[in-house]
Amino acid sequence: MELLWLSSIILGLSVAIPVGPITVEMIRQGLKRGFLHGWSVGLGGMTVDVLLMALLYFGASAFMMTPVIQQAMWIVGAAFLFYVGIVSIKEASAIHAVEEGAVPKTWLSSYANGFMVAVSPGNIVFWLSVFGTLLADKLGGPEKNRFLVMAAGVICGILIHDIVLMLLVTYMRKLMNGRWMKRISVCAGLALIYFGGMFVWRFVQSL
């Protein structure tokens, strides 16, 4: 069981390390508004992960894998990524407000951003592939415990990644001037728009 726990933490770290829309949004919010806002984005994403694991555990995988549900999630996710990306580019010109100490956005709104960005069929496919074997026999006592240990380990790994990432971002934030923060905000916005475009492409492919 200890080996399963450690391997699940490593799996969570390996899942979180690749740069995706959640990571981009975490870095963007962390640089602009500090540790709590960036971490809140990660917590929003982890909330979706936990909800997906719970739904899959209780047998909702067939419903979530239906084409209509997946297509709706691709479109909603793409629309939100486009919105956040455009806002990021527009807000780049107002970076100086942060340097003067004005932080008009609450951490709850950053949490909501993370939650919305994490809503995608890609997440469902990932959790199905990770927990597929355990889900098949989840009604058995030992397998039920293995599922819970594995799920907790993966979430713990993601949490470790998010905290370390935000500590690094917070440190870098102190070294950057307004010009660099503007450039990063624009780049992050373009990256989020790119991911939104990928969501649209996946929607077109699913038709």
Image (tube, rainbow, N blue to C red):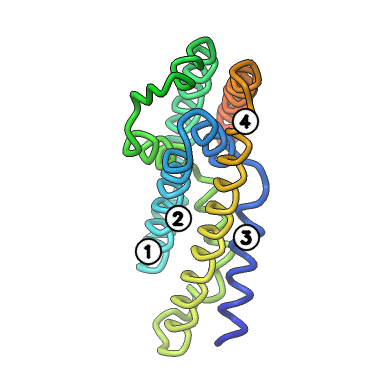
Q: Which mark is residue 13?
A: 3
Identify which amino acid the numbered label 3 is placed on.
Leu
Classify 10 Å Cα crowding around label 2: few (below 14), some (14-19), many (20 and above). many
Indicate which disc, 3 or 4, sits on the residue closer to the N terminus.
Answer: 3
Q: Measure the C-alpha gap from mark 2 to mark 3.
A: 14 Å
Q: Give the labeled residue for mark 2.
A: 49
Q: Nearer the viewer, mark 2 or mark 4?
A: 2
Is label 3 in contact with label 4 (beta carbons under 8 Å)? no
**Picture residue at 42% right of the left edge, 50% below the top:** 43
Q: Position of residue 22 (x, y in %)?
A: 54, 41
Q: Position of residue 175 (x, y in %)?
A: 64, 31
Q: Give the labeled residue for mark 1.
A: 54
Query: SS of the residue at dot 1?
Result: helix
Identify which amino acid the numbered label 4 is placed on.
Met
Q: Measure the C-alpha gap from mark 3 to mark 4.
A: 24 Å
Above or below residue 68? Residue 2 is below
> Which quadrant would residue 52 be assigned to in this image?
bottom left
Identify which amino acid the numbered label 2 is placed on.
Asp
Q: Give the labeled residue for mark 4.
A: 198
Is label 2 in contact with label 1 (beta carbons under 8 Å)? no
Q: Measure the C-alpha gap from mark 2 to mark 1.
A: 9 Å
Classify 10 Å Cα crowding around label 1: few (below 14), some (14-19), many (20 and above). some
Q: How many marks?
A: 4
Q: Measure the C-alpha gap from mark 2 to mark 4.
A: 20 Å
* Left or right relative to 187: residue 44: left
Query: SS of the residue at dot 2?
Result: helix
